[in-house]
Amino acid sequence: MKDTNWILRLAGRAAAAVVPLALLAFAPLAARPQVVDCVAARVDDQAITLTDVRILRSFDLLGPATPGAPPLSPAQTLEAAIDHRVVVGLTRQSLPVPKEELDARLKSLEARFTPAELQSRLAELGMTEDDLRPYLEEVLQYEKLITARFGQGADIGAGEIQDYYDHVYVPTMKAAGLEPKPMVQALGEIEDLLKNRRKESQVTAWIQGLRSQAAVSVHAACLDLLK
């Protein structure tokens, strides 16, 4: 299986508790950001470094899943990174990501920032845009594995939809001073919501099972450096 280690390709593997980033050697001394790196977690023999967490948070690569929700905390980001590593690593599946998909995801990421913002975030981490590709590749592999296993979610019965409409949707709309849509108009919206909830629950339970099979260790003292 192709190695999808989160560690930045130019940075190399983190072999000690605190190591310098190798990629900084390519920048002029005065321009190099002062970055302390350490191992925030290990999944079997693979390290997730503090730099990985900083990159994932800076570019919001792992969430939040709900639009408009606040950014993930360092601890939440690390937990999500562990989930991704466990899924991609323990499923023992190789799902290659076509270059076109990777290019498209990188363009989508770039579009979320102004050119100045993007370059500022990259410079702060001593990166180039191409250095984001290994991270995006693992995210895409994770998404492919989840879709392959769970598809678009389980079917929702008519009774479950009706129950949600009567006991959740209608009271919520009325409490907000809004007129509830007729059941026939709200049907699709409710069905999608319930499907997504059930899928999220199934995915969470599956990942917890995978994590129980892996040797996962979290080094809180390293993560505390981001606070």
Image (tube, rainbow, N blue to C red):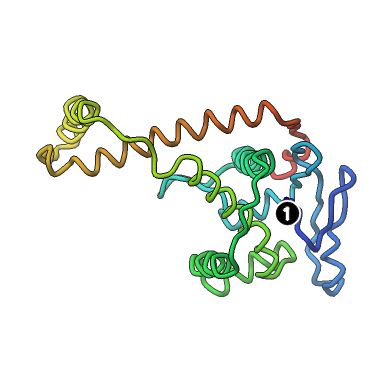
Q: Residues within 10 Å of mark 1 (few under 14, many from 20)?
A: few
Q: Residue at x 46, y 45 (%)?
A: 65
Q: Residue at x 19, y 40 (%)?
A: 187
In this rendering, the count of numbered labels is 1
Looking at the rendering, which quadrant does residue 132 occupy? bottom right
Q: Residue at x 53, y 70 (%)?
A: 107
Say which quadrant the C terminus sits in. Answer: top right
Asked if 45 appears above or below 119 in the picture, the reply is: above
Tell me the SS state at disc 1.
loop
Looking at the rendering, which quadrant does residue 81 occupy? top right
> x, y (%) of residue 162?
18, 29
> x, y (%) of residue 151?
43, 44
Looking at the rendering, which quadrant does residue 91 occupy? top right
Q: Residue at x 73, y 38 (%)?
A: 224
Asked if 101 appears above or below 166 in the picture, the reply is: below
Which sits in the foreground, 48 or 93?
Answer: 93
Q: Is residue 56 left or right of residue 111?
A: right
Q: Is residue 14 left or right of residue 158?
A: right
> x, y (%) of residue 100?
55, 70
Q: Name the residue tied to disc 1.
A: 2
> x, y (%) of residue 174?
15, 33
Which sits in the foreground, 169 or 86?
Answer: 86
Q: Is residue 161 left or right of residue 10?
A: left
Q: Amino acid at mark 1?
A: Lys
